[in-house]
Image (tube, grey):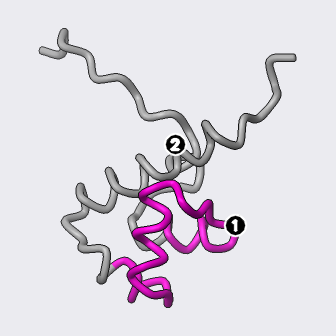
Amino acid sequence: MSNVIDKKDTGRNIARNVAHYRQRAEMSRYALAKAIGVGTIQITRIETERHCPGSIMLAHIAEALGVTADDLLNAPEKKSSNRG
């Protein structure tokens, strides 16, 4: 079945995407944590794949970063070297 969700891949996607979008927003872990009402350690745990946030926390993170939950769940796009 091709629709099977791999929790390990999902956790990795979330970790990479939270870090990516947080850095793109020029936001510290502290600032993101404060924006969603959690401790900095929680953001660190998410970005290092030691914790996978639930749907509500994921929605709060996405809102704070100005992206969608889908942006955080999907595999990061590979960068193309052919961009003009």
Give the number of the disc on residue 31: none
**Amino acid of disc 2:** Asn
Q: Position of residue 58 (x, y in %)?
A: 59, 65
In the drawing, does residue 30 fall left or right of residue 68? left
The answer to which quarter of the image holds residue 35 is bottom left
Q: Position of residue 54 (x, y in %)?
A: 69, 66
**Amino acid of disc 1:** Gly
Q: Nearer the viewer, residue 68 or 9?
A: 9
Label 1: which residue? 54
Label 2: which residue? 13
Helix, strand or loop for disc 2? helix
- Other residues around mark 1 within 10 Å, as few (<14) / some (14–19) / many (≥20): few
In the drawing, does residue 38 fall left or right of residue 30? right
User: For the point 30% across and 82% down, which residue is it?
Assistant: 31
In the drawing, does residue 60 fall left or right of residue 76? right
Where 77 falls versus 43 (above or below)?
above
Q: Mark 2 or mark 1, which has the lower sequence index? A: 2
Q: Which residues are magenta?
A: 32-61
The answer to which quarter of the image holds residue 19 is bottom left
